[in-house]
Image (tube, rainbow, N blue to C red):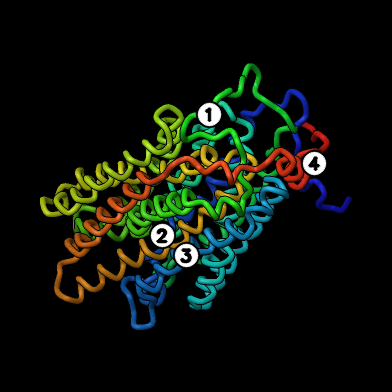
Amino acid sequence: MGALSFLDRQNTVAGPGFNRWLVPPAALCVHLCIGQAYAYSVFNLPMTKLIGITQSAPGDWKLTELGWIFSIAIFFLGVSSALFGRWVEEGGPRKAMFAAALCWAGGFFISAIGVKLHNLWLIYLGYGVLGGIALGIGYISPVSTLIKWFPDRPGMATGMAIMGFGGGAFIASPLSVWLMSKFSTPTHIGVMETFVILGVVYLFFMMVGAIIVRVPAPGWKPEGYVPPTTASKLITRNDVFVYDALKTPQFWLIWWVLCLNVTAGIGVLGQASAMSQEMFPGHITPVAAAGFVGLMSLFNMGGRFIWASTSDYIGRRNTYFVFMVLGFLLYCTVPYTGSIGSVTGFVCCFLIIISMYGGGFSTVPAYLRDMYGTRYVGAIHGLLLTAWSMAGIFGPVLVNYIREYNVTHGVPKAQAYNTTMYIMAGLLVIGFICNLLVKAVDTRFHMKDDEAERAAAEIGAVGKPAGA
């Protein structure tokens, strides 16, 4: 059996009477931890002064160099979710959560060494590469499981699975600022110690989630649930094999919809703390900026549940239409709020934008479920998250380098982000067109009955129940 046999999928099958509402807390244990990625911007400015302490010294890192840490992490999130998506589906959520916990904590520990040695490449390797792999595996680990536990409300289920990732920064942002203040001295900024503490805390809670999680027994259905006898135009009752999904135009259209929606939000989110301080100098302090990041996290989290649940009623395609149209209007409004010095207007615009940014992530697994069925939705979702990888590079690069170009050419810092906002609005127009072109998947891609039976055996659908 082996010492780690308790991680195997067949040993996580729920026994009779297991309460499916215990699975969302298991997902939250993982997603609240890896959601710290959205609070990483609170480290950016302190890490530009590790040598100078009060201000940047010649040997200190630049903001553009530090911006790559977040981009690398998001890039490897998409790559690892694509590479390991089928492994997660076959091995089960507990094994995936366990692996993610080790990688996530390890990323923090290696980054702490990088800060100690003032070696940026170690942080790229730790938080960027190893942490990014943890993000990818941990992110997709509960999604397919929750869709199977909640066939009656797939949008709500994916909202529950993913809302913790958006809410992680609500905890991590103030916690990180507090820890840095506790470990700071007149000659030292407490980033290294903060990384170590966060790594230990996250390792513990992610392991708790791995222990709690269960998968439903074969053929399980919620009490009183009757599957629909007919499929709507954009909701199939058939399954599509994971790699056949790549051959359909729908996959790539949804890929671009997600990529453009994420690009428009992720660059802003990754630099939210610095951007708010520079657009409103003297009005937004570092502490207030950290509070703003935390508030954005709350809306990111709430938007994931609310928008995904709403999609159960208005449809996934219509939900994305709302994201694109409303997002376009809000991005065009942001430069105006800066020009009139309206902190309230700026904050309100971005809180709504970030709610839709989070909603895009939580709605897309149900969108894929509608297109391709439930059997391989986790693996297909993993492949689609390569769109997040690309957006993780495009978004921060657009924000950071256009800002730097504007500042070096004499544009005031308070206006340096205006061009980027209009570019983001334009990206959403393209996303609207891609979403408009999404139609039902051609029947030739649907799995036949004999293929479905082989696939069921392949992913270990038959297993002995585990203790509840």
Q: Which residue is mark 4?
A: 11
User: Which residue bears the numbered disc 1?
Assistant: 231
Q: Earlier in the sequence, mark 1 or mark 4?
A: 4
Disc on the earlier residue, 3 or 1: 3
Residue closer to the observer: 159 or 174? 159
Which sits in the foreground, 108 or 312?
Answer: 312
* 3D distance between C-alphas at marks 1 and 4: 34 Å
- Of the pair 312 and 204, the residue shown nearer to us: 312
Of tags 1 and 2, the one toward the viewer is 1
Q: Identity of the amino acid at label 4? A: Asn
Q: Name which residue type carries label 1.
A: Ala
- How far apart marks 1 and 2 lie (CA) works out to 33 Å
Residue, disc 3: 191
Tell me the SS state at disc 3. Answer: helix
| Depicted 393 relative to depicted 449: above or below | below
Q: Which mark is residue 102?
A: none
> Whole-percent x and y of residue 75?
49, 63
Instruction: Look at the numbered disc 4 and give the secondary structure of its residue.
Output: helix
Please, what secondary structure does the residue beneath circle 2 have? helix
Give the amino acid type for the residue marked by disc 3 in the picture. Val
Nearest-to-viewer mark from 2 and 3: 2
Residue drawn 40% across the image and 43% down it: 300
- Report the residue marked by disc 2: 391
Counting residues from the start of the chain, the first of labels 4 and 2 encountered is 4
Q: Position of residue 287 (x, y in %)?
A: 32, 53
Gap between marks 4 and 2 measured at Cα: 37 Å
- The answer to whether mark 1 and mark 4 are in CB contact below 8 A is no
Q: Position of residue 60 (x, y in %)?
A: 38, 78
Q: Quadrant of the C terminus?
A: top right
When the figure is inspected, residue 56 is found, relative to residue 439, above or below; the finding is below
